[in-house]
Amino acid sequence: MSPIDEPSADGPPGLRERKKRQTRLALSRAAIRLCVLHGWAEVTIERIAAEADVSVRTFRNYFAGKAEAIAHSHLERMTGVAEDLLARPADEPLWEALRRAVLGRFAPPDSVPQDPRWREGVRLMLTEPALAGEIVKAGAAAERTLAAAVARRTGTDPDHDLHPRLVAAVVAAGSAVAVEHGLRSASAEPLDTVLTRVFEQLAAGLPVPQPGPHGPRPAEETRP
């Protein structure tokens, strides 16, 4: 997995690093777009490089294969969440700041509703066995990056304190649940709506919900 630097107190990265990051993201998005539209087996590294308008050598400088390229988008998005978290007002409650940071990256205001065919293509792509390991690695790197940002915001130590790592893991899990729900829901509920519900429940401490119309039925009383 090509590393992305953790949010730094020394300011934004230089022009060279920004260009490298842009190239990584362009390749990742090209890989996702092609695999969703044409299927995993039909997409080659050469095709991804051409889609991103770079050479195959450039692709190989950044990624070992298309699975790593696809998984990189998750790391990039969570790195953006970490950066946005650090840019939020210092007096804003942590969970509100996290909610806004996640919404800004996962469901930005100018996002376009996904076509059902695109959603189905994403679902199929995510079932590809070759992608599973890279997604796990990207997720672990993303949690470390977010934990570092949470630690800076809360004045804790990500290497010794439980809190920043726990928060990062919960945010990553909640965001993943929201995305999966959006991909699988027959009603195609907007992702920003689902994410908002997720963070409301997290901020409230995940209270036990009341049984809904499809929830468990009360146990029958035992007759003497």
Image: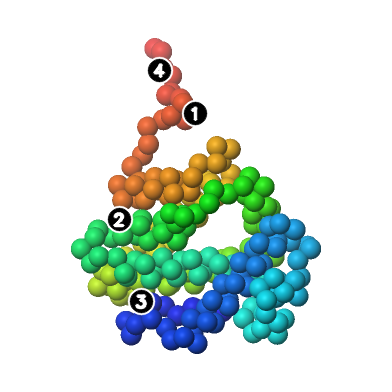
Where's residue 185, x and y in %? 56, 41
Tag shown at residue 214: 1
Confirm whether residue 223 shows in the render: yes
Crowdedness of circle 4 by 10 Å Cα count: few (<14), some, many (20+)? Answer: few
Amino acid marked by disc 2:
Glu
At a point 71% along the width and 57% down the height, the residue shown is 37
Badge 3 or badge 2: first in the primary sequence:
2
Residue beneath disc 3: 159
In the picture, measured across the screen, residue 159 lies left or right of residue 27, that is: left
Residue beneath disc 4: 221
Front: mark 4 or 1? 1
Image quadrant where one finds the N terminus: bottom right
Please identify the quarter of the rendering in which residue 32 is found. Answer: bottom right
Residue beneath disc 2: 96
Mark-to-mark CA distance, 4 and 1: 20 Å
In the picture, measured across the screen, residue 125 lies left or right of residue 26, that is: right
Tag shown at residue 47: none
Mark-to-mark CA distance, 2 and 4: 43 Å
Q: Which element type, helix, strand or loop, lies under badge 4?
A: loop
Q: Which element type, helix, strand or loop, lies under badge 2?
A: helix
In the picture, measured across the screen, residue 112 lies left or right of residue 207, that is: right
In the picture, measured across the screen, residue 49 lies left or right of residue 144, that is: right
Mark-to-mark CA distance, 3 and 1: 43 Å
Front: mark 2 or 1? 2
